[in-house]
């Protein structure tokens, strides 16, 4: 018995050690991402005759594109620039936008986009706001493709493109170009829609069918035609169905995760109503489409920080006839009300930004997932095998998360909210509140007693 207890203690110690190492690895990935952002910005700020080298008194209007961490904006303002920010992605309470607002600028800085097509779209939008002869600066790392980014600049709108490597900035560089005199009116009129592509989408398994139209066997001859699908540059997997999302949906189908919504009538606190589904980081709307097909009675909310992705999502699922789908531009949970909860959360969250690992979004998802679930609710999350999900779940307070499906590349994890656990949590909170009130009352009584004793002594 003693040997068994010692072995069990060793197992617990090993498990806790592995969790700690996994949590450290996740933190290191996020730190490395910030180091990359800081290095890219420093390359531009230290550039000789660059935008930060001289104080501007005239021709001083600057458009900063995708300066998400505000690493440039403040320093450029200190150099005399009147800076306007345009971010495709929402960050905290700052909304994202698919196209910059109206106005003209004397210079533009742009963080290099993750894909060539997305950079071409951003550069075209910037050209619509940049005066002829204005300077364009794109900055990034060699590993991100900054040295070959000039090929993605619209040839009619930019000239004199060259790459500048600042001494001491290592793997970072700046692409400079000058705005031509060519008109950008056609690009301006079309806006982001000039880059819209319509393709088709076929969901896996039962999700290829509307509910009530599924044959008893998956007969290819009886499968419905593919769904028309809108995408834009820079969307994950090109905005189509990727292998990870397909893996998640097949896992959900095997265990009836979406079908169980038919038996739900909504949270009692909300007076009944339809079950609620959240497609977290929903992109073009693939998981939201599956939810509407598996549970047409459900209220579906799709969130994503990418304003361009939401153009596609609104076209694909937001305007779908007969469906109850809301599309929100949101950095993680920001756009949701504090008390909004769900019966089911589905997510294939990004763990890369370009070629670099980045666990920021996944960390935010896990940090609030359990609180956002209704009693008996579940969060289904797919990630690559190398992502330390177990450690990250434990660090976020979701240590009872379970890996329900795995292959040689991906794993599906489920975070649950049990009514008993919720009741225990509520009881604990109530006890803490009662103790706090009691301690406060005791403290007040003690102060009154001391004051009374002082008065007695004076007498």
Image (tube, rainbow, N blue to C red):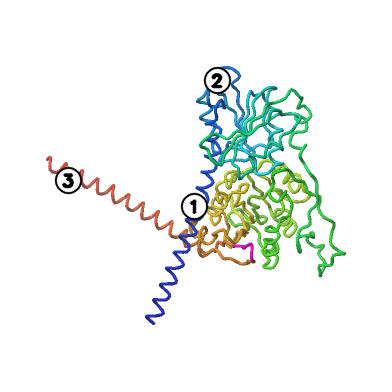
- Circle nearer the viewer, 3 or 1: 1
Which residue was labeled with disc 2?
A: 56
Q: Residue furthest front?
A: 167
User: In terms of sequence position, does the residue under pointer 1 or pointer 2 come before the other?
Assistant: 1
Place of residue 299 in the rendered image (x, y in percent of width and height, measured from the top left): 68, 52
Residue occupying the point 78% across, 54% down: 201
**Which corner quadrant holds the C terminus?**
top left
Place of residue 198 in the rendered image (x, y in percent of width and height, measured from the top left): 80, 46
Q: Specify the quadrant of the image occupied by residue 143.
A: top right
As drawn, is 80 to the left or to the right of 286? left
In depth, the one of 376 and 311 nearer the eye is 311
Figure check: 340 above or below 17: above
Which residue was labeled with disc 1?
A: 27
Q: Residues within 10 Å of mark 3 (few under 14, many from 20)?
A: few
Q: Alpha-carbon distance for marks 3 and 2?
A: 70 Å
- Circle nearer the viewer, 3 or 2: 2
CB within 8 Å, label 3 to label 1: no
Q: Alpha-carbon distance for marks 1 and 2?
A: 39 Å
Secondary structure state at the residue bearing disc 3: helix
Secondary structure state at the residue bearing disc 1: helix
Figure check: 58 above or below 375: above
Secondary structure state at the residue bearing disc 2: loop
Q: Which residues are magenta?
A: 408-413
User: In terms of sequence position, does the residue under pointer 3 or pointer 2 come before the other?
Assistant: 2
In depth, the one of 361 and 408 nearer the eye is 408
């Amino acid at each position: 018995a003693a040997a068994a207890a010692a072995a069990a203690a060793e197992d617990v110690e090993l498990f806790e050690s592995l969790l700690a190492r996994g949590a450290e690895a996740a933190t290191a990935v996020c730190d490395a991402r910030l180091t990359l952002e800081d290095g890219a910005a420093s390359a531009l700020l230290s550039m000789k005759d660059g935008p930060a080298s001289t104080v501007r008194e005239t021709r001083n209007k600057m458009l900063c594109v995708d300066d998400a961490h505000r690493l440039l904006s403040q320093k450029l303002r200190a150099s005399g620039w009147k800076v306007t920010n345009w971010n495709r992605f929402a960050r905290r309470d700052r909304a994202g936008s698919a196209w910059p607002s109206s106005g003209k600028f004397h210079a533009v800085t742009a963080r290099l986009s993750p894909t060539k097509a997305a950079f071409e779209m951003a550069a075209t939008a910037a050209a619509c706001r940049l005066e002829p002869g204005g300077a364009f600066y794109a900055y990034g790392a060699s590993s991100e493709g900054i040295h070959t980014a000039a090929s993605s600049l619209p040839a009619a709108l930019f000239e004199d493109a060259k790459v500048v490597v600042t001494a001491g900035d290592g793997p970072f560089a700046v692409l400079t170009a000058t705005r031509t005199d060519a008109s950008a009116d056609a690009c301006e009129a079309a806006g982001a829609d000039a880059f819209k592509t319509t393709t088709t989408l076929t969901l896996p398994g039962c999700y290829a069918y509307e509910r009530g139209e599924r044959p008893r066997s998956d007969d290819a001859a009886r499968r419905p035609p593919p769904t028309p699908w809108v995408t834009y540059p820079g969307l994950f997997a090109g905005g189509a169905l990727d292998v990870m999302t397909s893996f998640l949906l097949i896992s959900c189908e095997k265990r009836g995760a979406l079908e169980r919504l038919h038996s739900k009538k909504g949270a009692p606190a909300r007076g009944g109503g339809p079950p609620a589904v959240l497609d977290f980081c929903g992109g073009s709307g693939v998981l939201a489409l599956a939810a509407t097909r598996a549970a047409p009675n459900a209220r579906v909310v799709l969130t994503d920080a990418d304003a361009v992705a939401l153009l596609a999502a609104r076209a694909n699922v937001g305007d779908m006839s007969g469906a109850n789908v809301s599309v929100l531009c949101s950095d993680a949970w920001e756009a949701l009300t504090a008390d909004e909860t769900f019966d089911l959360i589905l997510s294939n969250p990004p763990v890369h930004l370009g070629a670099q690992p980045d666990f920021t979004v996944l960390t935010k998802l896990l940090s609030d997932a359990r609180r956002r679930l209704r009693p008996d609710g579940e969060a289904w999350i797919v990630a690559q095998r190398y992502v330390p999900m177990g450690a990250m779940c434990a660090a976020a307070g979701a240590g009872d998360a379970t890996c329900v499906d795995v292959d040689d590349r991906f794993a599906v994890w489920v975070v649950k909210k049990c009514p008993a656990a919720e009741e225990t949590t509520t009881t604990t909170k109530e006890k803490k509140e009662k103790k706090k009130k009691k301690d406060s009352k005791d403290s007040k009584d003690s102060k009154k007693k001391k004051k009374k004793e002082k008065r007695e002594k004076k007498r």
